[in-house]
Amino acid sequence: MINKNSPIPIYYQLEEHIRDLIEKGELRPGDSLPAEREYAETYRISRMTVRQALTKLVNDGYLYRLQGKGTFVAERKIEKALQGLTSFTQDMKARGLVPGSQLLHFERVPATDVIAKQLAIQEKRPVYEIKRIRLADKVPMALETTYISADLIKGLTEKIANQSLYAYMEEQLNLRIDHASQVIESSIATQNEADYLEIKSGAPVMRIQRNTYLQDETPVEFAKSVFRADRYKFVVQIKR
């Protein structure tokens, strides 16, 4: 597997070998990897070379380390392409995962000044405030808080709010969702967010603000989400 006469760096050969085992499913999430010393003795290479390969795989999200316990195969991250406007439910189904939601809060409240500006409505007009944990195969992926104008989206109930809001808008209300703008920032989880997402307080997360619009530019949704950075990544295709 390791060709010392190849112009390809040895650490990269080892890295690609381990990556291949993970992608083929021969190494599965949670599996423990051999110690650096074992790799070094097996392939007669330096431990520094082994460490370089493993560190690269850790940085790429294929592996993770536990101090005093070793190196393990990480859960694969879910990819989200930023080219199209899709719901969380659609994203998970497209990847063969079972989408789900846990409704934490559903209330009709008067719009604050900030929310009113985001939805282009008058302050104190009624809006639905919906807080949900978004799940994939029953694993928490994101904590989402959504605001929707009650004057625009009528008939919303707790049951509907715990499903796909986009599907309800388009299929039941015949509204055409057209485009959205998103702002993505790196951050760390608060204790409250960590509890909901089943991660450690201070763990890396991605904060996303989304403003969604109908074809006539009417704002239909203002959402703030916190995604687990260890299970989710965003991919952008850029053409020159």
Image: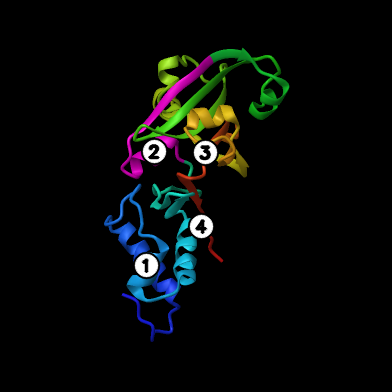
Q: Give the class, few, some or many, for how many residues have Cα within 10 Å of label 2's Cα (few <14, many ≥20).
A: some
The answer for how far apart the CA atoms under marks 1 and 2 are is 42 Å
Q: CA distance from mark 4 to mark 1?
A: 19 Å
Which residue matches tag 2? 90
Amino acid carrying mark 1 in the image: Tyr
**Tag 4: amino acid:** Asn
Q: Quadrant of the N terminus?
A: bottom left
Q: Amino acid at mark 3?
A: Phe
User: What SS does tag 4 mark?
Assistant: helix
In this view of the protein, can residue 156 be seen by the observer? Answer: yes
State the SS at label 1: helix
For disc 3, the neighbor class at 10 Å (few under 14, some 14 to 19, many from 20) is many
Q: Which label sits on residue 39?
A: 1
Q: Is residue 125 left or right of residue 7?
A: right
Tell me where residue 73 appears, x and y as whole percent. Answer: 38, 52
Q: Nearer the viewer, residue 108 or 138?
A: 138
Q: Residue furthest bottom?
A: 5
> Which one is closest to the eye, mark 3 or mark 2?
3
Quadrant housing residue 231: top left
Asked if the residue under mark 4 is in contact with the one under mark 3, i.e. CB atoms within 8 Å, the reply is no
Region in magenta:
86-106
Asked whether the beta carbons under mark 4 and mark 1 sit within 8 Å of each other, the answer is no
Above/below status of 198 relative to 182: above
Front position in the image: 225 or 187: 187
Depth check, mark 1 against mark 2: the one in front is 1
Residue depicted at 49% across the width and 67% down the height: 52
Quadrant hosting residue 126: top right
Query: Which residue has dot 3 on it?
Result: 227
Nearest to viewer (mark 4 / mark 1): 1
